[in-house]
Amino acid sequence: MQHLSPKEADAFLQTHPDAVFIDVRSEMEFLFIGHPKDSIHIAWNEFPDWDVNPHFLAQVRRATSVDRPLVLICRSGNRSAEAGQFLEQHGYSEVYNVLHGFEGPLDDHHHRGSLSGWRFEGLPWEQC
């Protein structure tokens, strides 16, 4: 798996129209916090128990093929890295993880979005 900064991921998506951009956060995060424009939602794990989504692989397979590049994003880059490793173990060879995710790491006041991440970088996003 390769890791890209948010700006590198955005540039990659612009130059690779065949890539599939998957937001692996929970449905609540995707809908209420916002998500990168043109990303699709397939949760890696979900509230309330945060177990790995048993349908994750099947949902990814419905959305794409093993021959297309996958760009994965989550809140901070951790869940998307786990999901990317899982997909590589299941035959996906071109997987990219967005470092710092959508909101980035916690700052000194335990808030996200003030240090790095997709939204911090001013990249296109939307909220439902």
Image (cartoon, helix red, strand yellow):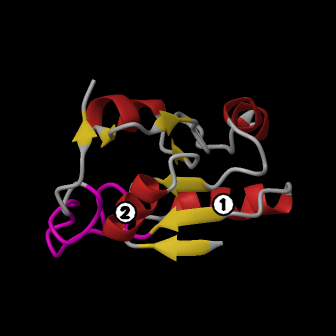
Of labels 2 and 1, the one closer to you = 2
Residue 15: x and y, percent? 45, 58
Q: Determine whether the residue tagged by mark 2 lies in a helix, strand or loop.
A: helix
Q: Residue tagged by mark 1?
A: 84
Please say whether residue 81 is visible from this viewpoint. Answer: no
| Residue 60 in which image quadrant | top right
Residue 95: x and y, percent? 65, 62
Residue at the image point whose x is 23% and y is 54% from the top = 123
Label 1: few (<14), some (14–19) or many (≥20) C-alpha neighbours in 10 Å: many
Q: Residue tagged by mark 2?
A: 11
Question: Could you tell whether 14 is left or right of 84 in the image?
Answer: left
The magenta span reads 99-118
Residue flagged by tag 2: what amino acid is it? Ala
Please say whether residue 41 is visible from this viewpoint. Answer: yes
Residue furthest right as drawn = 90
Residue at the image point whose x is 28% and y is 31% from the top = 32
Residue at the image point whose x is 25% and y is 31% from the top = 127
Residue 4: x and y, percent? 45, 72
Majority SS type along the magenta span: loop
Quadrant occupied by the C terminus: top left
On residue 47, which mark appears?
none
Question: Could you tell whether 53 is left or right of 107 in the image?
Answer: right
Q: Residue 51 versus residue 113: which sits nearer the camera?
A: 113
Question: Any magenta on residue 109?
Answer: yes
